[in-house]
């Protein structure tokens, strides 16, 4: 009889999972983060997967390769992958069949000794789930897995957008530094010319003072551009997921921004695809499906589960077999509260989906309108630059003919330099508008050849070992 208890207990103990400690050290992880480099051989292999025959040793890092480096390193993707693993584990939980229960009892009758005063019994209880509850639980968990997978894709797009924005800011700061440096050199040259003319009595103190003030302002603009460049480098390192010093040992190529990417604003198909195919849209659709299944599960709970318990009793020398049957009596409630909560969560998911699509429409319309308006401004800026350069050429010819002095030519060159800075600011705004459109559409506009694949496993190694 005791064997009937020992065998199930042995099976349960043998099937138990074992705890495996994984010590976590803040110092070790911090040191590993500080050691990250863009020269990691495994990173090179990862970049090769996204840019076949493009990434070679010694080549400058472009937007595409930096984006892939961010997909390799960025911690936000590790968080999304961990959530996906957790969602998959929830499917295992949902699919579990309730374990049977074993109950035993022993009774001693002191008034009866023959044939035996003992009554010993045991019952094995089985829970029979009704109305497809297990299938509903599995369906809900699988939909949440799909939502987590789409959230990972959304995180991938966000990482790409952050790298593009930071790289664009660095390009803009670098070019502004060059343009303001050229303008400062011309302004300094003009001040020197006016200083000599003032010493000779051919220029007024007012003119000299005005140009010195202009020189001070341009010098401050140069320092501000240097600050912007330093900040943009730090932003880029953060966007990629590496320490700032990792950017010191590499060269960068800004070709993605220097050349205007071809894009048709009439691409209505991309707009429709964004409204139904964006990863965050798909994630909310999967979440809605999960809430729908959760509601079905709560409705199924209006019908009770059944507990069946076959048993055996040794009753004072007699062998007795019995069958217990029990179920919940739904008298005081029929699960109305959980049903109402599940229905409300489904409506909440639907409302958030509508809000997201409205947000996408607004983001696309804003980006398109901004891009069109900036293109018109760019046309005006190009015309102003062309006019300034023609005027500069005329002054240069007049100088060669002896009709004007050197300061007049430098003034014309300063005018062109100022217009070019203004034009570049418009160019940056145009690239930013394209970036906003890329984010709204979730469609690559800058360097579309890069394979923006979503890695569901950590490319740096097994979970817990790749830092």
Image (cartoon, rainbow, N blue to C red):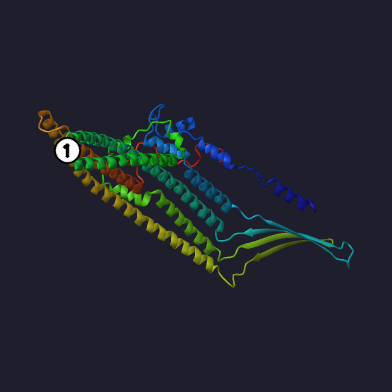
Instruction: Say whether residue 361 is left or right of residue 34.
Output: left
User: Who's the residue at 24% across and 37% down the image?
Assistant: 187
In the rendered view, tell whether residue 371 sits above or below residue 186.
below
Residue 253 location (% of width, % of height): 35, 33
Of the pair 335 and 348, the residue shown nearer to us: 348
User: Who's the residue at 51% across and 65% down the image?
Assistant: 339
Residue 396 location (% of width, % of height): 14, 31
User: Who's the residue at 41% across and 58% down the image?
Assistant: 352
Q: How many marks?
A: 1
In the rendered view, tell whether residue 402 sits above or below residue 329.
above
Quadrant holding the N terminus: bottom right
Instruction: Say whether residue 247 is left or right of residue 178.
Output: right
Residue 294 seen in this snapshot:
yes
In the rendered view, tell whether residue 216 sits above or below residue 248.
below
Residue 462 location (% of width, % of height): 55, 38
Q: Residues within 10 Å of mark 1 (few under 14, many from 20)?
A: some
User: Who's the residue at 51% across and 35% down the image?
Assistant: 35
Residue 430 location (% of width, % of height): 28, 44
The residue that label 1 is drawn on is 203
Dot 1 lies on which element?
loop
Tell me the quarter of the picture where residue 202 sits: top left
Of the pair 431 and 16, the residue shown nearer to us: 431
């Amino acid at each position: 009889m005791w064997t009937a208890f020992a065998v199930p207990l042995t099976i349960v103990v043998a099937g138990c999972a074992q705890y495996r400690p994984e010590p976590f050290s803040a110092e070790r992880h911090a040191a590993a983060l500080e050691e990250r480099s863009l020269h990691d051989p495994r990173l090179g292999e990862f970049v090769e997967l996204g840019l076949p025959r493009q990434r070679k040793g010694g080549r400058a890092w472009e937007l595409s390769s930096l984006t892939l480096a961010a997909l390799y390193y960025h911690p936000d993707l590790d968080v999304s992958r961990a959530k996906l693993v957790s969602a998959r584990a929830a499917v295992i939980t949902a699919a579990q069949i309730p374990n049977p229960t074993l109950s035993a009892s022993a009774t001693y009758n002191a008034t009866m000794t023959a044939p035996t005063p003992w009554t010993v019994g045991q019952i094995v209880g089985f829970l029979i789930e009704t109305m497809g509850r297990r299938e509903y639980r599995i369906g809900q968990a699988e939909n949440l897995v799909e939502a987590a997978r789409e959230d990972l894709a959304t995180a991938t797009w966000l990482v790409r957008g952050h790298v593009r924005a930071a790289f664009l800011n660095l390009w803009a700061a670098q070019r502004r530094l060059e343009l303001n440096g050229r303008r400062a050199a011309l302004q300094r040259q003009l001040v020197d010319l006016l200083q000599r003319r003032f010493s000779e009595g051919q220029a007024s103190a007012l003119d000299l003072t005005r140009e010195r003030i202009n020189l001070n302002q341009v010098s401050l603009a140069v320092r501000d551009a240097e600050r912007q460049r330093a900040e943009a480098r730090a932003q880029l390192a953060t966007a990629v997921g590496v320490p700032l010093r990792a950017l010191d040992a590499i060269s960068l190529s800004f070709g993605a921004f220097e050349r205007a990417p071809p894009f048709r604003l009439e691409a209505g198909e991309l707009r429709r695809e964004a409204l139904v195919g964006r990863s965050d849209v798909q994630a909310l659709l999967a979440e809605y499906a999960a809430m729908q299944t959760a509601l079905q599960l709560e409705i199924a709970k209006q019908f009770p589960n059944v507990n069946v318990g076959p048993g055996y009793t040794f009753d004072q020398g007699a062998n007795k077999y019995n069958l217990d049957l029990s179920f919940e009596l739904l008298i005081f409630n029929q699960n109305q509260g959980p049903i109402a909560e599940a229905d409300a969560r489904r409506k909440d998911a639907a409302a958030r989906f509508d809000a997201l699509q409205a947000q996408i429409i607004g983001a696309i319309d804003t980006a398109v309108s901004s891009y069109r308006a900036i293109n018109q401004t760019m046309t005006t800026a190009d015309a102003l630059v062309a006019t300034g350069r023609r005027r500069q050429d005329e002054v240069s010819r007049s100088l060669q003919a002896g009709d004007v002095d050197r300061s007049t030519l430098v003034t014309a060159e300063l005018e062109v330099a100022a217009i070019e800075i203004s034009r570049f600011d418009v160019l940056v705004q145009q690239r930013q508008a394209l970036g906003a459109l890329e984010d709204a559409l979730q469609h690559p506009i800058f360097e579309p050849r890069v394979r923006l694949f979503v890695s569901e496993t950590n490319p740096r190694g097994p979970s817990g070992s790749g830092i």
